[in-house]
Structure formats: structure tokens, C-alpha cells
Image (tube, rainbow, N blue to C red):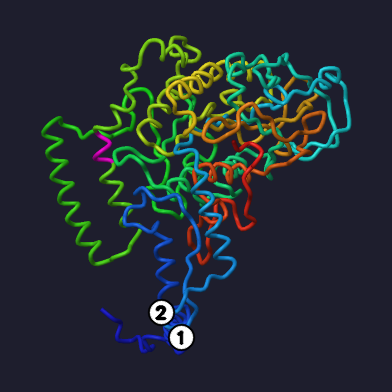
């Protein structure tokens, strides 16, 4: 009940003018922009469809419209920018090679000079202090003590690629792989580096790469998530779910964690057996009725649509997910190919095998993490480099080689893009006065891709003679993202999502071109 002693008017003059002015200005703005523009922004915000995960034609471009005031039968006029965007989209659609992505994320930052970036001159410099600028978690330094490569490199394949003895199995697949030795990024810190590699930004809140792929293409399977994430048995990376978030996009586009042991997704099945399932079905029917009434009263609400789709997907996954992760149907030879017959490789091998099964079932984007938690639980070799990298390469080498071999044997490699790498690389110098530990290095590192329209047996770009900094054909993380989108049939500079008054893009306002040297 209002206080009778309160004699203040319900609104101050300033509040009245502000509220009224805001309304009139909005009406005027709507009239100036026109219904076409407003309708376009509404569609962009909810993915141009009632179901954000519905399959879409891989085409992103600007529409061509008649000029303001033109007659109804006037010939449409396209401005150059719109024509250019449409041309880029047409080209991307025609050149689409991949339908799924498997991103093998080596969390912590593997050392490029100990894996795939052969620097023979480093061996002789081992233990010597030299002037070489570096930038890591210890800040910027003018030089330091060189830690020479701790493994021998040998040439492999018809392409003659130099590969470290850390990867004896993967070395047999180099003719299917395109190596990019000149990657660079802004941040040498795990948190922002992970966000940069996963979401294209140094700060959180933006959609991840898998969300962009599903936003642009939709899901090819109604019964499974379009975006799946599998973590290392030691835990997840820094930032947690921010690395596979949908950001400001509908929540149905975010990554779904899948486990390879036990229940694939926690709390997927209702308790109580058949009686519990019947109760669940009844609740879901009532919930669907409530949602339908609410949706009718609030048409065009992308958040509501996403929520409804998530409920329906979870219900369908109760039968689809257990079948997808049932590896008992795989032959003994296939299981051995992935290393499931050895304790060291079994865990990561199961994830790689599951990734192949998900690709077969139409999942668009699968991310598999090697390494979790902190210290030597991931590739972050600040202490003993040999112990760290031997451990993680030993767990992943055979499964990854098996994945590439299996995909190729089944005819899936040509339509599946496999990406390998971490958030950054490591320095050629020691981090501390003693030991072999290397600090982070975002100035130059290696990543590789295979399948999905990639030209195998190629090496692109180069770091300096010490492997410290990218110097030839330098490629930013944005270029890697642009390459992935391009191979999926999406225009990286045209794919956008309207949010907060801006056409947001994975490659940012700067834009980025694909790494054309790796395109088949």
C-alpha cells in the first residue's frame, strides 16, 4: 500500500522526458531503417530459422534489393559490397570440402622445436646463453640459455617431412598432413590463449568455433548434439566451459561434454525404470504444451526456441547417445588401431574412436582434449621437458595416427577436417636457471591439419633459425579459423551474428583470409 505521506509525483520531469523521448526516437528510427532491415536483424539473431540446429545451406552473403523509392517492378540494384559478399559466399559454397571437424586440442602448449619444427642448429647451441627475445608467462626477456631438442628428427613419407621421434606412428601419416609452422597469437597466457584459439577473442563471452560452425551449417543429426567436447581424464582446461560456449548465440549451439566411460552424459536417463520413463514422458508433454503457448504469445524469441530444442534433444539423446558411444561393436583390429589394447593409449584412443563414430553420425564439430588440470597433467612443460612430452606424446601418438588411418580407410578423411595444436608453443630457451623446462611462446608455433580439402604432405611458413618467432608467411589464429570455416563451405568474412548493435564475426572486424597454401 502506498505511503499517504509520500507526496512526490509518480515520475519526475526528467524521467518523463527520458521515457517518452526514448519511445518517440525508437519509432522514428524504425521508420528510417525500414521493415527489411529490422526483419533481417531479427533473423540474424535467431539463426534465420525456428530451430538453431536445423541443417542450413552453406551460404553466407548479402541480399540484393531495390533502391528506396523504386517502383515495384524496378530492376534490383546491388551495391559493390553486396555483390562482393555474395560472390565470396558462392565461392565458399562451391569449394566446401569438409562436413565435420575433429579438433585435437593439445592443452598446455606443445613445443614446436621438439615435435614438428626441425631446427638442426639448436642441437649445437644446447646450454649456451644467447640473445634471443622471448615473451612468455615470465614476461619479455632479451635472451636466455638454449635448450636443444631432446629428440632426434627423421624424414618420413614421400614428402620427406622431418618429424621428431616423439611421434613414430604419426610420422607414417605425414603425406596426409599439412603443417603450418608460422602460427602466432597475441597472448602467451593459458586463459586468454585458450579463449583466443577457441573463440577468436582474448576475453570471454564470445561464441566458440564449434558454435560458429553449427550456427552456419546446422546439425546433420537430430538425435545428437551438433557440437561435442571430450575432456582429458585429468580434468578440463583453464576457463572450463567458456572454451566451448555459445556466447550470445542460442544455448543449443554450445558444446556438450561427452564421457567415454560409463554414462556418456550425466543424468541422461530418468530414475525409476519404466515408471520413471512414463512420468518423464508425461512431464515433457505438459512442458511442450506450456512452451507452445508461451511461444505463441512471444513469437520470434530465440532464447525460448533454443530452450525448447534443448529439452527435445535431451529426450532423443536417451536412446541415440548410448548407441553412439558403444565401442563393443568395433572389431578387435579397429580397437587395436586406436591403441585400446594398451593402458597408456586406451583413454585417448577411446576418444578418437568415438570421434570417428560421431562423424559417421553427422556431428559437425568434435573437440578432443589431451591434457587437463595443471602442471604435468597437460603439455605445459615448465619443469622436465622430457618427462612431460614423453608422457603426452606417448598417450596420443598411436590414437591420432589410428584416427587418420581409419578415416582414410572408410573414405571419411576427405570430408572430415582434423586439426591438431595447442593454444601456443614453447620457447627455445630455458625458463629457469636449471632444467629443461620451456616457457610459453605465442610468437611462433606449429599446428597441422589433415583431410577435408587439405593438401597433404605440405609444410607452410617458417619460424626463425631458433624456432622462436614466425618470420615467413605468418598466420594469425584468425587465419586458422578462416581456413576451417572456408573448408566447411562458410565465408569467414561474411558469416556474422547480429549482437549488441554489431555484426559479430569469428574472425573479428579485421577479417581474415584462409591459409590458401594448404588448400587442395
Is residue 41 placed above or below 223 in the rendered structure? below
Magenta stretch: dominant SS? helix
Q: Quick one: label 2, few (<14), some, or many (20+) residues within 10 Å?
A: few
Task: Please give the name of the residue rendered at 25% of the width and 78% of the height, measured from the top-left corner.
Answer: 1
Q: Is residue 137 visible?
A: no
User: Tag 1's secondary structure?
Assistant: helix
Left or right, residue 365 beside residue 170: left
Task: Please give the name of the residue rendered at 25% of the width and 34% of the height, measured from the top-left corner.
Answer: 318
Give x and y (percent) for residue 78: 53, 70
Residue 335 versus residue 15: which sits nearer the camera?
335
Is residue 397 placed above or below 322 in the rendered structure? above
Task: Please give the name of the residue rendered at 45% of the width and 20% of the height, measured from the top-left corner.
Answer: 409
Q: Which mark is on residue 21? A: 1
User: Tag 2's secondary structure?
Assistant: loop
Is residue 349 placed above or below 71 in the rendered structure? above
Left or right, residue 434 beside residue 482: right
Is residue 35 placed above or below 450 in the rendered structure? below
Q: Which one is in front in this view, the residue at disc 2 or the one at disc 1? A: 2
Cβ atoms under marks 2 and 1 closer than 8 Å? no
> Mark 2 — residue?
73
Residue 386 included in the magenta stretch of the image: no
Left or right, residue 283 beside residue 406: left
As measured in the structure, the alpha-carbon distance from the residue carrying label 2 to the one carrying label 1 is 38 Å
Residue 75 versus residue 465: which sits nearer the camera?
75
Which is more N-terminal, label 1 or label 2? 1
Give x and y (percent) for residue 458: 66, 29
Give x and y (percent) for residue 450: 56, 30
User: Quadrant of the image for the C terminus?
Assistant: top right
Tell me which segment is drawn in magenta: 314-318
Amino acid at each position: 500500500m502506498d505511503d499517504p505521506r509520500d507526496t512526490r509525483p509518480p515520475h519526475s520531469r526528467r524521467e518523463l522526458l527520458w521515457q517518452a523521448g526514448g519511445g518517440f526516437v525508437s519509432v522514428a528510427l524504425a521508420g528510417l531503417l525500414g521493415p527489411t532491415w529490422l526483419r533481417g536483424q531479427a533473423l540474424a539473431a535467431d539463426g534465420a530459422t525456428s530451430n538453431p540446429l536445423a541443417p542450413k545451406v552453406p551460404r553466407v552473403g548479402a541480399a540484393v534489393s531495390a533502391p528506396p523509392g523504386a517502383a515495384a517492378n524496378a530492376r534490383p540494384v546491388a551495391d559493390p559490397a553486396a555483390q562482393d559478399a555474395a560472390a565470396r559466399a558462392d565461392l565458399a559454397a562451391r569449394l566446401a570440402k569438409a562436413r565435420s571437424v575433429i579438433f585435437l586440442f593439445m592443452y598446455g602448449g606443445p613445443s614446436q622445436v621438439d615435435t614438428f619444427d626441425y631446427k638442426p642448429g639448436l642441437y649445437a647451441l644446447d646450454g649456451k646463453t644467447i640473445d634471443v627475445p622471448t615473451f612468455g608467462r615470465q614476461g619479455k626477456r632479451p635472451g636466455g640459455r638454449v635448450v636443444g631438442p631432446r629428440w632426434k628428427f627423421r624424414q618420413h613419407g614421400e614428402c620427406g617431412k622431418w618429424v621428431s621421434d616423439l611421434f613414430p606412428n604419426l610420422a607414417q601419416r605425414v603425406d596426409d598432413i599439412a603443417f603450418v609452422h608460422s602460427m602466432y597469437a597475441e597472448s602467451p597466457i593459458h586463459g586468454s590463449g585458450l579463449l583466443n584459439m577457441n573463440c577468436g577473442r582474448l576475453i570471454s563471452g564470445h561464441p566458440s568455433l564449434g558454435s560458429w560452425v553449427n550456427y552456419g551449417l546446422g546439425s546433420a543429426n537430430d538425435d545428437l548434439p551438433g557440437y561435442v567436447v571430450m575432456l582429458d581424464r585429468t580434468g578440463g582446461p583453464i576457463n572450463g566451459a567458456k572454451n566451448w560456449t555459445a556466447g550470445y548465440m542460442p544455448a543449443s549451439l554450445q558444446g556438450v561434454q561427452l564421457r567415454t566411460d560409463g554414462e556418456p552424459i550425466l543424468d541422461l536417463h530418468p530414475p525409476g525404470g519404466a515408471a520413471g520413463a512414463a512420468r518423464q514422458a508425461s512431464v515433457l508433454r505438459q512442458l511442450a504444451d506450456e512452451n507452445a503457448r508461451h511461444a505463441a504469445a512471444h513469437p520470434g524469441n530465440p532464447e525460448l526456441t533454443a530452450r525448447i530444442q534443448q529439452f527435445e534433444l535431451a529426450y532423443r539423446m536417451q536412446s541415440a547417445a548410448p548407441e553412439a558411444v558403444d565401442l563393443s561393436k568395433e572389431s578387435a583390429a579397429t580397437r587395436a588401431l586406436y591403441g585400446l589394447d594398451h593402458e597408456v593409449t586406451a583413454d585417448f584412443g577411446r576418444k578418437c574412436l568415438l570421434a570417428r563414430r560421431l562423424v559417421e553420425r553427422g556431428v559437425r564439430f568434435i573437440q578432443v582434449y589431451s591434457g587437463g588440470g595443471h602442471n604435468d597433467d597437460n603439455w605445459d612443460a615448465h619443469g622436465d621437458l622430457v618427462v612431460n612430452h614423453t608422457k603426452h606424446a606417448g598417450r596420443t601418438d598411436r590414437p591420432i595416427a589410428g584416427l587418420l588411418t581409419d578415416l582414410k580407410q572408410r573414405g571419411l578423411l576427405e570430408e572430415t577436417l582434423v586439426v591438431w595444436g595447442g593454444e601456443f608453443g614453447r620457447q627455445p630457451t630455458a625458463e629457469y636457471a636449471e632444467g629443461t623446462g620451456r616457457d610459453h611462446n605465442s610468437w611462433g608455433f606449429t599446428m597441422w591439419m589433415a583431410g577435408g580439402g587439405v593438401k597433404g604432405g605440405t609444410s607452410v611458413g617458417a619460424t626463425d633459425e631458433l624456432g622462436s618467432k614466425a618470420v615467413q608467411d605468418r598466420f594469425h589464429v584468425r587465419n586458422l579459423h578462416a581456413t576451417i570455416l572456408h573448408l566447411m563451405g562458410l565465408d569467414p568474412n561474411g558469416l556474422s551474428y547480429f549482437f549488441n548493435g554489431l555484426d559479430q564475426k569469428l574472425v573479428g572486424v579485421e577479417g581474415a583470409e584462409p591459409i590458401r597454401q594448404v588448400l587442395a
